[in-house]
Image: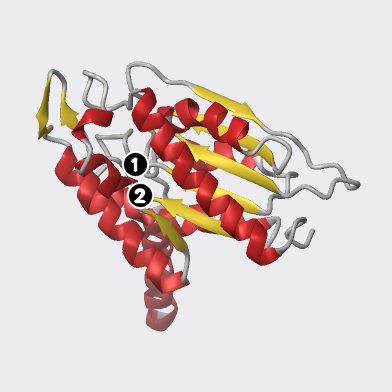
Amino acid sequence: MKKCLLAGIFLFVFSVASFSQAKPSQSRNESIEWSHSWIIEKPDSSELPSILLIGDSHVERYFPVVNKNLDGKIIVSKITTSKSMGDPYLIKQLDVLIARAKFDIIFFNNGLHGVSYTPQEYAKYIPVVYKLLVRNNPKVKIVWINTTARRIAGDLENFDRYNDDVNKRNEFVDKFCKSKNISMLDFSSLSINNQNYYTNDGIHFNPEGVNAQAQMITDVVLKLISTSGAGMGH
């Protein structure tokens, strides 16, 4: 009887502990929440490769430039959102939006939003996002873009109080990408070394900076196309 009782107590404690560990973090909304998706499903007859750009307002700004740069060479889609890794609703958004679509190349750029999430909460979602990105195409080329620095609005020579967390997030991304042999695009260094790329808000890029980001992405895409073949194998 005692053995059964002890077994029952152990099972109860184990179940509670497991539930606690599995329980997702709560979504912490910002004052303005937004998302914008533009997904073009690649026709079976198309020989053009397809890419997906995922990220925040930086992606929103450089998407049309990338699209113009690659016009006639590739099919470009995007998912932009104010949701950050650390927020369970980001996973839900991505899960729904890329449930059916299949891409040859995915650029992922997320890290400026969700300042209320710790770098550890952010990092917990890195492997979760990765599994979603490769779910429909295990051979997809992933390019992870690290996060641009945050500067003080009106005082662009200095970084704001959240920038330390941005750097820590980038460290977690770098470690994960090295472990999975994932290509990285260094927007962090681009932003640190080019104060003149910023608008006065200290977060967004002006047209010169946007063009620099778009050109970096364009160069990577053209290189991948040339080394992997026009249709990228699907």
Considering only vertical position in the picture, is 136 above or below 56?
Answer: below
Q: Earlier in the sequence, mark 2 or mark 1?
A: 1
Q: Residue at x 63, y 39 (%)?
A: 70
| Neighbours of disc 1 within 10 Å: few (<14), some (14-19), many (20+) | many
Question: Quadrant of residue 141 in the image?
Answer: bottom right
Kind of element beneath mark 2 = loop
State the residue in front, 63 or 87: 63
Q: Which residue is mark 1?
A: 111
Give the colour scheme shown.
Answer: secondary structure
User: Going by the image, does 42 lie left or right of 135?
Assistant: right
User: Going by the image, does 26 lie left or right of 42?
Assistant: left
Kind of element beneath mark 1 = loop
The x and y percentages for residue 163 are 17, 40
Considering only vertical position in the picture, is 196 above or below 233?
Answer: above
Query: Tag 1: residue type?
Result: Gly
Considering only vertical position in the picture, is 101 above or below 13?
Answer: above
| Neighbours of disc 2 within 10 Å: few (<14), some (14-19), many (20+) | many
Q: Is residue 190 visible?
A: yes
User: Going by the image, does 221 lie left or right of 25?
Assistant: right
Which residue occupies the extreme bottom position in the image?
A: 3
Query: Tag 2: residue type?
Result: Asn
State the residue in front, 49 or 222: 222
Q: Is residue 140 visible?
A: no
Q: Residue at x 83, y 50 (%)?
A: 47
State the residue in front, 138 or 13: 138
In the rendered image, which quarter contains the N terminus? Answer: bottom left
Q: Residue at x 35, y 31 (%)?
A: 209
Question: Quadrant of residue 156 in the image?
Answer: top left
Q: Which residue is mark 2?
A: 146
Q: Residue at x 50, y 52 (%)?
A: 129
The x and y percentages for residue 90 are 48, 38
